[in-house]
Image (cartoon, rainbow, N blue to C red):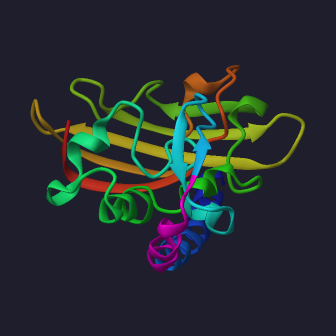
Amino acid sequence: MNLLLALIQWALLIAVRVILILLGLPIVALAIPFRVNAVSASDDRPIVNLPRWAWLFGNDYDGLLGDKRGWWADNTPFGWSVDSLAAMWWWAAVRNPVNNLRLVPGISCPVSECLITYRGHYSVEDKPDRGGWQFVTARRIGGVSRWYGFYLAHQWSDTRAFVIRIGYKIKPSHQGGDEPAKGMTFKLNPWKEI
């Protein structure tokens, strides 16, 4: 029963997400010239983000200039400068599209308010020797809402793995923690670098 509900939930989420991603391609391009200074919702550092009218397509955690580790600054496509309009557009519209959707109540999973159960392995990551599979269910305590996530990482070699991650980015380790709400993902990579 949970698998059937998960498949229905994922199909609806994929439809919503695809439509929003396609809308976001031009919206992000139009909004970047009107970018604003802001503060990260995750760690209070200064960021640059999309204006309020394009909020859904922005990133309240990392803004338009990439992650706090500096990974994006080191890995922008085509050697673009991280603060170029093209790199900001790629980060917000292609690499992390519709990022603030994970902050929308009813669409995001409030893991800190949920009972989390799983089948498969407790911990799965697309990193060397951390593979396996898990089907995770988060159910709001005292409620009926449920969120589902599936994660499979099969290591081919020391550097490559087959990875599928569908649904919500929920983990068994989120149980009883104070993690922020989790969004959804749809990742299929038969040859992911690990």
Residue 185 at what x, y percent from top left? 48, 53
Residue at 43% in and 56% down: 96
**Magenta residues, as a range?**
24-36
> In terms of depth relative to the viewer, which is nearer, 90 or 157?
90
Picture quadrant where residue 41 is located: top right
In the rendered structure, the answer to whether residue 45 lies left or right of residue 142 reads left
4 up-or-down from 151: above or below? below
* Residue at the spot 70% in from the left edge and 20% down from the top edge: 176
Q: Is residue 164 above or below residue 98?
A: above
Main SS of residues in magenta: helix
Name the residue furthest top.
Answer: 176
Q: Is residue 26 visible?
A: yes
Q: Residue at x 59, y 66 (%)?
A: 13
Q: Position of residue 61 (x, y in %)?
A: 55, 41
Q: Is residue 103 above or below residue 16?
A: above
In the rendered image, residue 102 lying in the magenta stretch gets the answer no
The N terminus, quarter of image: bottom right
User: Is 31 contained in the magenta span?
Assistant: yes
Q: Is residue 168 visible?
A: no
Q: In this view, which residue lies farthest toward the right? A: 142
Q: Name the residue nearer the viewer: 192 or 78.
A: 78
Q: Nearer the viewer, residue 77 or 161?
A: 77
- The residue located at (13%, 39%) in the rendering is 156
Image quadrant occupied by the C terminus: top left
